Amino acid sequence: MNREVQRILVVDDEEDLCDILRFNLENEGYAVDVAYSAEEALRTDLNQYDLLLLDVMMGEISGFRMIKMLRAKPETADLPVIFLTARDTENDTVTGLSLGADDYISKPFSIREVVLRVKAVLRRNKHSQSPRSAFVSYLGIQLDMSRKTAVLDGATVSLTKTEFEILALLIQGAGRVYSRAEIVDLVWQDDAYVLDRTVDVNITRLRRKLGTYGQRIITRQGYGYCFQME
């Protein structure tokens, strides 16, 4: 998005928390709006935002259900989302990431932690919009690096920004084994909060979305991942 001020929407039914987040994020220079339910958020034009901070446990439409709705629509499929939630078990974290979240922050949290993670996700988003070459392709897979679109055997496939960046990295370096740490450094860059498990979750999602081509993403046990052309 070509705006100087980046816009964030906080979606949480705790009004006091929304006020705290808005105050502190605005102090960091962001434009911040608040919605107190997923229903309210879905009635707004979400394309005006660069990032959503989304609570999991809300009324009729939970955060998990809302992100499924967002990822199902082309216009919001790649909208960055950070979950804010009191549900902090490993299963909940993996579920959130598997649904396409860019990060997952457990309550209670420090405002400094939230600010750092917001900056990291927005920085990754900006990095993913920097073209490296016009197209990256292999057989029926074609990635348009300027438009950030992915086509699989002639049909558009919805990838999150992270999935897109990982796939582009692996195809461009086909045959090379990338360790999880290298993938984190190259895709997430200097976000210190990314875990190895996050890489595995994104690889699993990629394999599923790529169908038979997913078999080309090979696990080298003890080393990492590579894209095998033949």
Image (cartoon, rainbow, N blue to C red):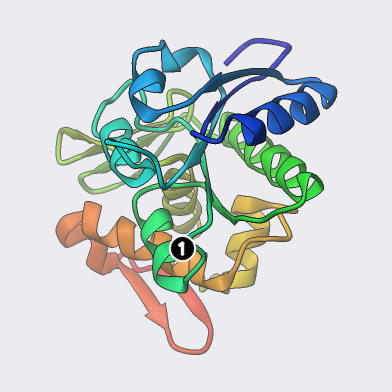
- Residue 147 in the image: above or below residue 103: above
User: Measuring 75% from the left and 40% from the top, which residue is drawn there?
Assistant: 115
User: Measuring 70% from the left and 25% from the top, which residue is drawn there?
Assistant: 22
On-image quarter of the C terminus: bottom left
- The residue identified by callout 1 is 93
Question: As rendered, which of 32 and 139 lies closer to the eye?
Answer: 32
- For label 1, the SS is helix
The amino acid pointed to by label 1 is Thr
Q: Position of residue 157 (x, y in %)?
A: 24, 38
Q: Position of residue 228 (x, y in %)?
A: 34, 68
- Residue 89 in the image: above or below residue 35: below
Q: Is residue 132 left or right of residue 56?
A: right
User: Measuring 15% from the left and 34% from the top, which residue is drawn there?
Assistant: 154
Q: Where is residue 203 in the image (x, y as percent from the top left)?
A: 39, 63
Q: In this view, does 143 lie to the left or right of 105?
A: left
Q: In this view, does 8 lie to the left or right of 220?
A: right
